Image (cartoon, rainbow, N blue to C red):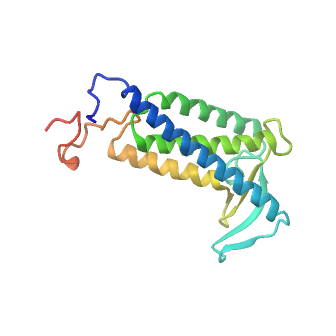
């Protein structure tokens, strides 16, 4: 398949459908892994004690986090819920231009992770959008969950994509022609 011409705003519909499917599958897997590990943590770590996982490097310890990473915003649970909803809306808006498999994976990871933590906000005590997110992976300087791993992974992938100049639509940035050997649909030698 050839790269889209500069005047096309979206990839072909069949390619977009495949990329939406990739985004959806990744989101479901990210969400399921997050919720499954949280359920296991709730069942097995209820004692509140730290349990070695990778020696003392990473431990497992259950907490309910009312805030964001590092428990920032602990007194502003509704703001955290609002941010999660805004992230979901932004993903949907950005995904409309989807033309890259790597971006589909990154957005799927973000979507699944955001939905995982947002689910906690509504179903964990005290509930109603103010619930505490289940965190259980203790890195010694903060405690997180699998959704946090997916968020960081997505962020790293997005940074890499930005650094190599691949846009959400799959087009390459025109800044550096030589590093890609003159290949690609929109590049000029």
At 58% from the left and 43% from the top, the residue drawn is: 27
Q: Position of residue 56 (x, y in %)?
A: 66, 76
Q: How many discs appear?
A: 0
Residue 76 visible in this rendered orientation of the protein: no
Q: Is residue 7 above or below residue 111?
A: above
Q: Position of residue 23 (x, y in %)?
A: 51, 39
Q: Position of residue 169 (x, y in %)?
A: 38, 33
At 29% from the left and 30% from the top, the residue drawn is: 4
Left or right of 160: which side holds 84?
Answer: right
Q: Is residue 36 above or below residue 184?
A: below
Quadrant where the N terminus is found in the figure: top left
At 80% from the left and 65% from the top, the residue drawn is: 44
Quadrant where the C terminus is found in the figure: top left
- Tell me where residue 5 sits by quadrant: top left
Left or right of 27: which side holds 128?
Answer: right
At 55% from the left and 30% from the top, the residue drawn is: 92
Which residue occupies the foreground of this view, 39 or 57?
Answer: 39
Residue 16 visible in this rendered orientation of the protein: yes
Q: Position of residue 108 (x, y in %)?
A: 54, 42
- Tell me where residue 50 sits by quadrant: bottom right
As drawn, the residue found furthest toward the left would be 189
- Tell me where residue 182 sits by quadrant: top left
Left or right of 187: which side holds 51?
Answer: right
Left or right of 119: which side holds 188?
Answer: left
């Amino acid at each position: 398949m050839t790269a889209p011409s500069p005047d096309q705003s979206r990839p072909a519909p069949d390619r977009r459908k495949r990329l939406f499917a990739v985004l959806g599958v990744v989101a479901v897997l990210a969400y399921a892994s997050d919720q499954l590990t949280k359920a296991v943590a709730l069942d097995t770590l209820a004692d509140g004690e730290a349990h070695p996982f990778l020696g003392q490097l990473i431990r497992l310890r259950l907490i309910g986090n009312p805030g964001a990473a590092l428990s920032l915003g602990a007194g502003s649970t509704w703001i955290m819920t609002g941010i999660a909803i805004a992230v979901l809306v932004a993903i949907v808006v950005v995904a409309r231009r989807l033309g890259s498999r790597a971006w589909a994976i990154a957005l799927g990871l973000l979507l699944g992770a955001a939905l995982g933590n947002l689910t906690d906000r509504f179903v964990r005590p005290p509930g109603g959008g103010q619930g505490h997110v289940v965190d259980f992976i203790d890195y010694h300087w903060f405690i997180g969950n699998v959704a946090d791993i997916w968020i960081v992974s997505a962020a790293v992938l997005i940074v890499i994509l930005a650094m190599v100049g691949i846009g959400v639509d799959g087009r390459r940035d025109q800044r550096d022609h030589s590093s890609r050997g003159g290949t690609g649909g929109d590049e000029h030698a």
